[in-house]
């Protein structure tokens, strides 16, 4: 029998109505209309929550856990984080043998919204040629996933 997971909003009715804010989030129209796709937007919102919305805040949750929380596949989370990094919504600090650190950047440093499709296309082309971008000097969760799939593909080719 499967156990039910704890959920923060599990028993909202037991709390007094006046103990909740009237709204739990405010999304500025600049972000809302910037052109992020739903996966990028959701991942960005999660990173903001983890960092407290401050540039000095750090999000270091694994991409696997983040994807799970954001209700998306690992692949979608990988693509979304790449867009957020290239569009300068967040910075990434690689940590050898540990999860990467992500920090939000000030709005003034974001890439122009007109460039988002170009960034997505560049990333999509890059995922077709993963082997040229892999570096095992600093294995991260995403590079380990990518190198595993390449290794499997190479084994299949060798057996043919």
Image (tube, helix red, strand yellow):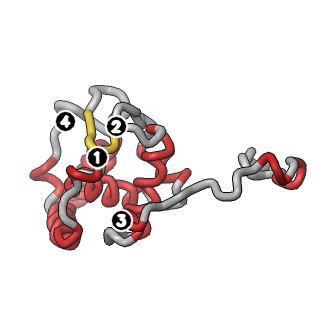
Residue at image point 54% right, 59% down: 71
Residue nearer the viewer, 18 or 126 = 18
Report x, y in % for residue 52. Answer: 48, 39
Dot placed on the residue nearer the N-terminal end, 1 or 2: 2
Q: In the rendered image, which residue does mark 4 sit on? A: 136
Q: Is residue 153 left or right of residue 59?
A: left
In what element is the residue under mark 3?
helix
Q: In the rendered image, which residue does mark 3 sit on? A: 30
Dot placed on the residue nearer the N-terminal end, 1 or 4: 1
For residue 42, above or below residue 60: below
Dot placed on the residue nearer the N-terminal end, 1 or 3: 3
How far apart marks 3 and 2 lie (CA) works out to 18 Å
Q: In the rendered image, which residue does mark 2 sit on? A: 55
Q: In the rendered image, which residue does mark 1 sit on? A: 106
How far apart marks 4 and 2 lie (CA) works out to 29 Å
Residue nearer the viewer, 65 or 28 = 28
In what element is the residue under mark 4?
loop
Report x, y in % for residue 109. Answer: 20, 50
Mark 3: few/some/many CA within 10 Å (<14, 14-19, 20+): few
Report x, y in % for residue 87. Answer: 22, 57
Q: Badges 1 and 2: C-beta atoms under 8 Å apart?
A: yes
In what element is the residue under mark 1?
loop
Q: Is residue 129 left or right of residue 36?
A: left
């Amino acid at each position: 029998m499967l156990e039910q997971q704890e959920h923060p909003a599990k028993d909202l009715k037991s709390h007094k109505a006046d103990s909740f804010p009237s709204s739990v989030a405010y999304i500025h129209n600049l972000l809302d209309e910037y052109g992020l796709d739903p996966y990028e937007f959701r991942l960005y919102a999660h990173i903001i929550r983890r960092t407290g919305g401050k540039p000095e805040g750090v999000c270091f949750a694994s991409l696997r856990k983040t994807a799970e929380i954001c209700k998306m596949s690992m692949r979608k989370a990988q693509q979304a984080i790449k867009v957020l990094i290239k569009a300068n919504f967040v910075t990434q600090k690689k940590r050898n043998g540990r999860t990467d650190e992500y920090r939000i950047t000030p709005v003034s440093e974001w890439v122009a919204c007109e460039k988002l499709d170009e960034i997505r296309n560049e990333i999509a082309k890059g995922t077709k040629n993963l082997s040229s971008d892999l570096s095992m000097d600093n294995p991260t969760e995403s590079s380990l996933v990518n190198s595993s799939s390449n290794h499997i593909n190479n084994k299949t080719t060798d057996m043919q």
